[in-house]
Amino acid sequence: MEKKGWDGFEIGAMLRTFDGAVSDIATTLPENRPYSQSSSFTASVADWRIEKPLFNKDYCIDCQFCWVYCPDMSIISRDKKMIGIDFDHCKGCGICVQVCPTNPKSLLMFPEQKDEESALAEWPKKEKKDQAEEPKED
Amino acid sequence: MSEMKKIKNLKDFSTSADRFEGANLLCPGCAHSIIVREVLNATNDDLILAASTGCLEVCTAVYPYTSWDASWIHIGFENGSSAVAGAEAMYKALKTKGRLKQPDRVPKFVAFGGDGATYDIGFQWISGCFERGHNMMYVCLDNEVYANTGGQRSSSTPIGASATTTPAGRVSYGEKRNKKDMMAIMAAHGAPYVAQVAPNKWKDMVAKIQKGFAAEGPVYINAMSACTTEWKFAPEDTISISDLATDSLVFPLYEIIDGTKLNITYRPKNIVPVRDYLGAQGRFKHLFTKQYDYLIDEWQTRVDAKWDYLQRREEASV
Ligand SMILES: Cc1ncc(C[n+]2csc(CCOP(=O)(O)OP(=O)(O)O)c2C)c(N)n1
Ligand code: SF4
Ligand code: SF4
Ligand code: SF4
Ligand SMILES: [Mg+2]
């Protein structure tokens, strides 16, 4: 569908988030939602990033701190497990890395062009106890 | 009333399907967004939302996009509260007349506004809504400044903060007046539930939002919203700055029930000096010279006195 300009709408026109009906949005996960072109979900802010977070699942304890504190709905958790990052909506703020309590961290910031494989290959090892940050309580 | 969503722990909470979308234009690391997620995800009920003009509204409704997966109203800077109150009044009227198409679905009515919209510009509208007793929740996203228009001071800006209309310089240390106590003012309306929350304490937040949703009548939530741009700290530090705010007791977490019973809901294990909270933010950096030592001491005394007052009220159950 072609996008209308702002002056192409009638006064009082309504922009719908979804094409068609969604009977219970609160229990429908994004992958099952019929987002319309009016939802910012269909847009990307990937070009805002200078650095991006990468995820190493070997150290992850699924605490979900990254999920709850990500301002941009960009930590993908399903069935109580952290499974990845939504790089269309991640703005690269770095909060998820800061709040990740594992040692070494399961999320780290890398330059935008870094490939995942080499990032995982050079992932830091466990820090000694006295240097490590204490895990945060929730 | 519909059943309350069960959220026992963070793993439970993480199964929520967000009704607030990415690729909005809020700054990287913006706490407004973290707060909105925690509020919306506290319920599975339908939502009727409004936002007053400010960062949240401006950044989530940029043509041709909306970032809201719920009914969402924007009218003006001053009247997000009355927009939601109007919708709530209509809902009640249709219910009384038996004209609701899905009477079993009981929506939640929530208005969001910044501190500028709440403490200053929209104050009489909010006061009116609370006096009329609408069944709604008003959430103030309190970043202590008019962020969206470039950082002018509001009546929530605390002493010593440099804002664009109260800049620190050779002759001034910035804002001269103390932050207005909105919690006390809203409690004085006799509202059934008034609470201060912070995004870094998600569990306390969710418990309070759910209590607010369960209450009959107008509910006021004052949400501390650390602003990376105006408080001047790195975006990745939003949660650690928020921790300093709650652990220094600059933002104590408490609730007031029916205007008369105060409960403290978070007691830091280690209370952090106010100096550490101030020192972590660029908006206070000019205070760290010998001549303004006394201001930092006064800050600490003020925070201690407030904490003492809250504890006395809790003890006396008033
Ligand atoms: C009546 C009116 N006055 C002024 C403005 C300009 N204005 C838009 S947003 C804003 C500041 C909002 O500050 P706040 O409510 O604290 O929200 P924040 O952006 O900090 O989240 C101002 C002054 C307006 N839109 N309407
Ligand atoms: S960098 Fe920021 S936006 Fe990206 S996933 Fe982490 S917390 Fe979310
Ligand atoms: S914060 Fe770290 S350990 Fe916790 S779920 Fe996220 S990646 Fe895993
Ligand atoms: S200026 Fe502050 S409140 Fe506004 S979008 Fe940026 S971080 Fe959020
Ligand atoms: Mg503000």
Image (cartoon, rainbow, N blue to C red):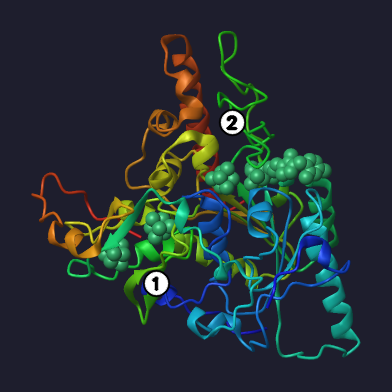
Q: In this view, does B232 lie above or below A138?
A: above
Chain letter belonging to callout 2: B
Chain letter belonging to callout 1: A
Q: Is residue A110 left or right of residue A6?
A: left
Q: Where is residue B96 in the image (x, y as percent from the top left)?
A: 88, 84
- Residue closer to the observer: B96 or B113: B113
Q: Is residue A67 above or below residue B139?
A: below
Q: Is residue B182 visible?
A: no
- Residue closer to the observer: A91 or B38: A91
Q: Residues within 10 Å of mark 2 (few under 14, many from 20)?
A: many
x 55%, y 69%: residue: A41
Discs 1 and 2 carry the same chain letter: no
- Give the labeled residue for mark 2: B158
- Residue closer to the observer: B9 or A131: A131
Q: In this view, does B59 lie above or below A131?
A: below
- Residue closer to the observer: A45 or B54: A45
Q: Which residue lies furthest to the left in this view?
A: A128
- Give the amino acid type for the residue marked by disc 1 in the picture: Ile
Q: Is mark 1 on a helix, strand or loop?
A: strand
Q: In this view, does B88 lie to the left or right of B300?
A: right
Residue A76: give its label.
Answer: 1
Residue A42: give its label.
Answer: none
